[in-house]
Amino acid sequence: MKIDFAREIALKIIYNVDEKKAYSNILLDEFLNENRQKLNIKDVNFISEIVYGVISKKLTLDVIIKKYSNIKLNKISKWTLNILRIGAYQIIFLDKVPKSAAVNECVNLAKKYNYKSANFVNAILRKIEKKDYEEIDKITDIIERLSKKYSMPEWIVKELFKEYEIDILEQILKVFNEKPVTTIRINNLKTTKEEVKEILRKSNIEHIDVDKSDFLHLKGIKDISNLEIFKDGYITVQDIGAGAIVKMLQPKENEKVLDACSAPGGKTTYIAQMMNNKGQIIAWDLYPNRLNLVAENAKRLGIDIIKTQAKDATIFDSKYVEKFDKILLDVPCLGLGVIKRKPDIKWQKKETDIEEITKIQIKILQNCFYYLKKGGNLVYSTCSILKDENEDIIKLFVEECRKNNQEIKILESKKIIPNTLNDGFYMCKICKEL
């Protein structure tokens, strides 16, 4: 019995995500790096497809597996259940994989990881057909149908349904299940967009130009860490929406800027890039190991104006009052805008998290506004698309400022609804008036 190595790697990643509540993108990178010599590009792409596909569509897959299982899902071993999910995903969503191959390879995995379950896995997978997914459309209850069709917890569907019309909501949920596009930012401290495009052409890497910007969308590539232009600091990974937040801040040369929630450093390094690496950026984060990522990114990109500090932005520090020209607050959030990139989010977050996270968000905004110089600008942002974390936070903050006679002005705000090429973000620019 020969086990398909790519499927086995995918199974191990999914199992560890399920059991250890680890993030799939981090585990995927770790497993791929450990086994790089044994895998070709086809294997890497297939593993990524299975991992993100199964994790993203877990709820839908479980609905279909439950239909044919005489054992409750919570009574099935985790190894067996994840093998069933991998098989069901291939049968329903991957047209290029023959059903017989999907079934046989999963049975082989079952024989290795839970031998007694092999016949059980074989029986269930042979019954599953694409029509099982199509039948979900017959569910009459809107919330239940959208939840099961797009593999989204009902509480998230309900929250979004409060804010968006049904056609927009369904489009958002559909996008959440799409494969994320890899978007790169050109580091113009070291190179130009035209030079990067020429290097990509010579490497046969397809790309889509985003006019009048520092960004390119890459096609058919998920992992760019082994590209020489990445290692040399010519490019870095960043979504256009994340870049738009920095552009709204409009950092200038020789300013003193605070990035109060900086790790892993994508926006921090873009601030430095827009400042032409001239001035000073103070980068805070709660955890020193996450700040190491900021420092590593900065070094690779040739940036030396960022100073990292392990600091909790929810705790007020009087020594920073009116010290900064610009402040970026990309605050902790539920992250619903980036679900297609981090599908684990929808299984790890709970409805009760909204109240807890909004308390943190308003506290950071209240504290850090004191650190802004008069005449300076602050951008509050999240990668969430819920009003609770965005417009409602700004509304509450404005009301409190007026009560305290603080002179502020909302200069602009923007919400990016997730689409095929962009993640979802909210951003609001606030001025502390003279």
Image (cartoon, rainbow, N blue to C red):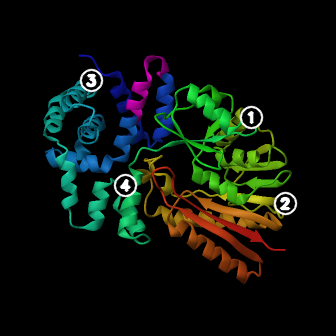
Kindly identify which numbered label has been placed on residue 323.
2
Kindly identify which numbered label has been placed on residue 50.
none
Labels 4 and 2: the sequence-earlier one = 4
- Compared to 339, does 395 lie above or below? below
Dot in front, 4 or 1:
1
Which residue was labeled with disc 1? 190
User: In the structure shown, which secondary structural element does the residue marked by tag 2 occupy?
Assistant: loop
Q: CA distance from mark 2 to mark 1?
A: 30 Å
Screen quadrant of the C terminus: bottom right
Which residue was labeled with disc 4? 174
Q: Position of residue 330 (x, y in %)?
A: 64, 56
Screen quadrant of the N terminus: top left
Labels 3 and 1: the sequence-earlier one = 3
Q: CA distance from mark 4 to mark 2?
A: 44 Å
User: In the structure shown, which secondary structural element does the residue marked by tag 1 occupy?
Assistant: loop
Labels 2 and 1: the sequence-earlier one = 1
Which residue was labeled with disc 3? 112
Amino acid at circle 1: Lys
Q: Are marks 4 and 1 in contact (CB under 8 Å)?
A: no
Q: Are marks 2 and 3 in contact (CB under 8 Å)?
A: no
Is 37 a magenta residue? yes
Q: CA distance from mark 4 to mark 3?
A: 35 Å
Q: Position of residue 321 (x, y in %)?
A: 83, 64
Chief secondary structure of the magenta span? Answer: helix
Q: CA distance from mark 2 to mark 3?
A: 61 Å
Q: Are marks 4 and 3 in contact (CB under 8 Å)?
A: no
